[in-house]
Image: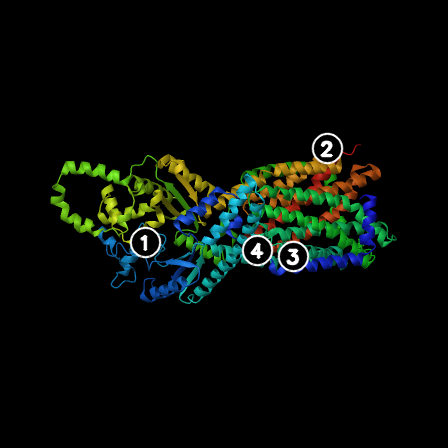
């Protein structure tokens, strides 16, 4: 530390320690006043790419076809058959109460859909109101068979065993939300492409604030709605086994799990760390000072985030734990250095000891913080706003941790006075010295093991997958897991995917097909058709007089998708989709045509397709056609739900569907587009992989440059960075070998590992250089470095590993992964700094002979 800066530091902190502490506490209290406004954001908007064209298209499709947001309540009676009258009345009551909840636009269950085979109806009957399951005189067992076998209803209304059904509650389309987010994104795009004038900047600021406030209120409403539905279904659990599913439910439960982990396991981690620090240092002051520093740092940062309404998301929820790790590491290094100086100079004054502690640790700690910031800076290049925010949060938090560590710890030391010299009771040097002796005597084995570990890591990294299945975020015995499993296996899947198809530009209109076909038909058969089949035809289809100007059929426009060619394309693609193991229910116009053909007893020609289309009543049209056809655009939609339990791999599934549609069905790529939550989350994951894993090389280049500035030696810098490569490779390779996917919760582990490894390398080499300057002996310098700084590294690693092991008790699987991977990162960093790093120093001798 420069002399002038050290003098200023002594005057401000060491000469007035109480004032420094009081000022820090005052700032903390001011920040703490904002904590009641602390918020977590797990909305779908927080997990998507900024300026994602697929996101904009998703919103367009939502406005065209209506809301695709839903909650689904599964229902399996505990006694009797599902189709018993009593159970059907209970189901009806549940449906009616669910429909009455605010925000529910409509409900759909097996009680509401028209029956087409119970008994079998004629095409002409489709213009009339049809029976439903609760209609008088309906054969319920025949209806049950229809639900199990009908192309329209199977796999969505009734499970294969006939004992589980569901009520689908479609949530209202939030037009205000769409208007606000569209206005904000349009201004953001303009800002990034052309720039904004003053008025537009103010407009962007205003609409962004308005949208954030509205989204906050909406998130609270959504959470409350899920709570109301849960409360509602609780009243029916004595009669049936009931589970709840849907995107809003997943969001609500993820927030609850994260909040629970932050509170319960946050306290647990602190208690574990208290016990570990007490066991290591055996002095209350060396437990209290680190914990006070960590607490002040967390309160100030969380308070700041609350004041400026900067929200933690699912991705950045590990911010608190990471900040705790880094702050604790800084405080332990200061304490260990102080104890070391006190042991060497027991008669020195407290001010001298504290000054020497600060002076000797300032440079390595500052460079540790800077290089850790570089590691987390890799997150800022992402296109995902929560990931960008996480990078900036960590940058601010780490900087604050450095400041507080060099204020609270030294000021606390000055206020508490000299501690009892307990260095003689500390046996950790015996442990670290064993690492030194192993490295000296078995150095070749260290290199062999490092090489082997590198090979294994490369193999593991090659097996890494970028994927996230929400069901894998929860333990198998939790209600949310069991509910998603039931919905997947019995009621058609969990994650929505839409395939939007445009009519090919060369396609003949349905009217042209009809004229061409039936012109030839009349030429060949003349009036014989009318003489032989006319009466029967009119009986089955109705007459022209049956279709007046007010009917839906009369206003229908020609559509390629209601022609034999278009329906054949849809049928081929739909059959392929239904055959995929990871896809549940598939819905399209092809199934309506399939049912119509079955009702007719033969495959429909274009004339019959047109008549069938005109025969649909308005209610049936709205239920069975409108969700899949936009007439004005001659656009159709195939809806499907992917099954989380079937080994879902989003990117592979989308590629497989696209290839079949283009190569086998003959759909032009420009006429087909995917949308839905499955697509948006897949885009997010692919972006995470590209922007984080692929930029690790750039991060290491940045760290290498900082090493060059710090150590002023190319050899020493290369030696320092090699163990970091190995540590990062070990963690990522371990994830690949044990099939832990890179997803939105684990993607940051690479930055974490690099940050921890850099910390160890800088502290060890800095101390090694200091010891080498004493006698120029590499081996002796290694032993002394292990006995001094090695203790701090050992303390930090053990405290964090033990503390974060408690996360393995969480019900939220990403929290378990985070605890395990953090422990693995700390172990890799510790072993690298205790064995491989010193062996490279002994082998290459970068400091001269």
Instruction: Between label 4 and label 3, give the one nearer the viewer.
Output: 3
Instruction: Between label 1 and label 4, give the one nearer the viewer.
Output: 4
Q: N-terminal of the two: label 1 or label 3?
A: 1
| Residue under pointer 1 | 148
Cα–Cα span, label 4 and label 2: 45 Å
State if disc 1 and disc 2 touch (CB < 8 Å). no
Cα–Cα span, label 3 and label 2: 42 Å
Residue 801 at x, y percent in the picture: 65, 51
Element under disc 4: strand
Q: N-terminal of the two: label 4 or label 3?
A: 4
Cα–Cα span, label 4 and label 3: 13 Å
Q: N-terminal of the two: label 2 or label 1?
A: 1
Q: Quadrant of the N terminus?
A: top right
Task: Identify the image quadrant of residue 168.
Answer: bottom left
Crowd band around label 1 with a 10 angstrom C-alpha radius: few (<14), some (14–19), many (20+): many
Left or right: residue 24 versus residue 456 is: right
* Dot label at residue 714: 2
Left or right: residue 341 versus residue 473 is: right
Crowd band around label 3 with a 10 angstrom C-alpha radius: few (<14), some (14–19), many (20+): many
| Residue under pointer 3 | 303
Q: Is residue 720 above or below residue 93?
A: above
Instruction: Between label 4 and label 2, give the one nearer the viewer.
Output: 4
């Amino acid at each position: 530390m420069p002399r002038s800066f050290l003098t200023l530091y002594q005057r401000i902190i060491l000469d007035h320690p109480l004032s420094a502490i009081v000022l820090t506490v005052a700032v903390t209290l001011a920040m703490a006043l904002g904590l009641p406004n602390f918020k977590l954001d797990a909305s779908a908007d927080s997990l998507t790419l900024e300026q994602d064209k697929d996101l904009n298209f998703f919103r367009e499709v939502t406005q065209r076809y209506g809301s695709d947001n839903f909650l689904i309540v599964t229902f399996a009676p505990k006694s009797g058959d599902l189709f018993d009258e009593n159970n059907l009345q209970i189901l009806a009551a549940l449906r009616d109460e669910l429909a009455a909840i605010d925000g529910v636009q409509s409900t759909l269950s097996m009680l509401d859909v028209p029956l087409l085979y119970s008994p079998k109806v004629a095409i002409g009957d489709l213009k009339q109101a049809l029976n439903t399951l609760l209609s008088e005189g309906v054969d319920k067992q025949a209806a049950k068979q229809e639900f199990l076998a009908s192309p329209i209803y199977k796999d969505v209304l009734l499970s294969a065993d006939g004992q589980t059904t569901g009520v689908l509650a479609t949530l209202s389309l939030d037009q205000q939300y769409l208007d606000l987010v569209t206005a904000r994104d349009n201004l953001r795009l303009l800002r990034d492409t052309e720039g904004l004038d003053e008025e537009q900047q103010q407009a962007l600021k205003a609409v962004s604030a308005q949208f954030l406030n509205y989204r906050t209120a909406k998130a609270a409403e959504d959470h409350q709605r899920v709570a109301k539905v849960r409360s509602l279904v609780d009243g029916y659990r004595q009669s049936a086994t009931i589970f709840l599913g849907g995107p809003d439910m997943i969001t609500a439960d993820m927030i609850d799990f994260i909040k629970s982990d932050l509170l319960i396991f946050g306290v647990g981690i602190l208690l574990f760390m208290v016990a570990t620090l007490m066991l290591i240092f055996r002095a209350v002051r060396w437990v209290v000072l680190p914990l006070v520093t960590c607490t002040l740092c967390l309160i100030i940062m969380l308070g700041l985030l609350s004041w400026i309404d900067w929200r933690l998301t699912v991705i950045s929820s590990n911010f608190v734990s990471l900040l705790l790790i880094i702050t604790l590491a800084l405080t332990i290094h200061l304490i260990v250095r102080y104890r070391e100086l006190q042991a060497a100079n027991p008669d020195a004054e407290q001010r001298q000891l504290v000054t020497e502690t600060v002076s000797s640790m300032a440079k390595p700690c500052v460079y540790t913080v800077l290089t850790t910031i570089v590691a987390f800076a890799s997150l800022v290049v992402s296109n995902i706003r929560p990931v960008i925010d996480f990078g900036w949060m960590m940058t601010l938090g780490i900087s604050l941790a450095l400041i507080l560590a060099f204020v609270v710890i030294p000021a606390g030391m000055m206020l508490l006075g000299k501690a009892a010299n307990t260095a003689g009771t500390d046996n950790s040097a015996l442990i670290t010295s064993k690492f030194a002796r192993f490295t000296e005597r078995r150095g070749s084995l260290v290199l062999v093991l490092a090489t082997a570990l590198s090979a294994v890591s490369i193999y593991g990294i090659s097996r890494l997958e970028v994927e996230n299945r929400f069901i894998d975020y929860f333990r198998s015995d939790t209600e949310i897991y069991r509910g998603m499993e039931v919905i997947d296996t019995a009621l058609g899947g969990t994650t929505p995917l839409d395939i939007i198809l445009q009519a090919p530009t060369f396609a003949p209109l349905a009217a042209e097909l009809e004229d061409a076909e039936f012109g030839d038909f009349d030429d060949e058969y003349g009036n014989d058709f009318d003489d032989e089949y006319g009466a029967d035809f009119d009986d089955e289809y109705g007459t022209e007089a049956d279709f007046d100007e007010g009917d839906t059929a009369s206003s229908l426009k020609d559509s390629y998708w209601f022609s034999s060619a278009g329906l054949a394309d849809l049928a081929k693609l739909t059959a392929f989709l239904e055959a995929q193991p990871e896809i549940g229910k598939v819905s399209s116009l092809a199934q309506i045509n399939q049912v119509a053909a079955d009702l007719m007893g033969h495959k429909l020609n274009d004339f019959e397709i047109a008549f069938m289309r005109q025969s649909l009543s308005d209610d049936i049209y709205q239920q069975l056609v409108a969700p899949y056809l936009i007439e004005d655009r001659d656009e159709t939609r195939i809806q499907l739900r992917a099954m989380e339990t079937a080994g879902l791999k989003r990117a592979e599934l989308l590629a497989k569907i696209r290839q079949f549609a283009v190569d086998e069905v003959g759909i032009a790529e420009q006429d087909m587009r995917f949308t839905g939550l499955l697509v948006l989350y897949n885009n997010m994951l692919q972006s995470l992989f590209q922007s984080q894993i692929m930029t690790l090389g750039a991060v290491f280049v940045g760290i290498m440059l900082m090493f060059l500035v710090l150590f002023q030696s190319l050899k020493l810098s290369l030696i320092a960075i090699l163990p970091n490569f190995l540590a990062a490779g070990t963690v990522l390779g371990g994830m690949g070998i044990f099939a832990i996917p890179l997803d939105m919760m684990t993607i940051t582990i690479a930055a974490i590992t690099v940050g921890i490894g850099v910390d160890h390398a800088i502290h060890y080499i800095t101390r090694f250089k200091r010891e080498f300057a004493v006698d120029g002996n590499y081996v002796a310098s290694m032993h002394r470095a292990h006995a001094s700084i090695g203790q701090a590294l050992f303390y930090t690693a053990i405290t964090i590993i033990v503390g974060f092991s408690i996360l393995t008790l969480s019900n939220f699987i990403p929290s378990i992964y985070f605890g395990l991977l953090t422990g693995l990162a700390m172990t890799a960093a510790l072993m690298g700094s205790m064995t491989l790093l010193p062996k490279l120093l002994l082998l290459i001798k970068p400091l001269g002979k």
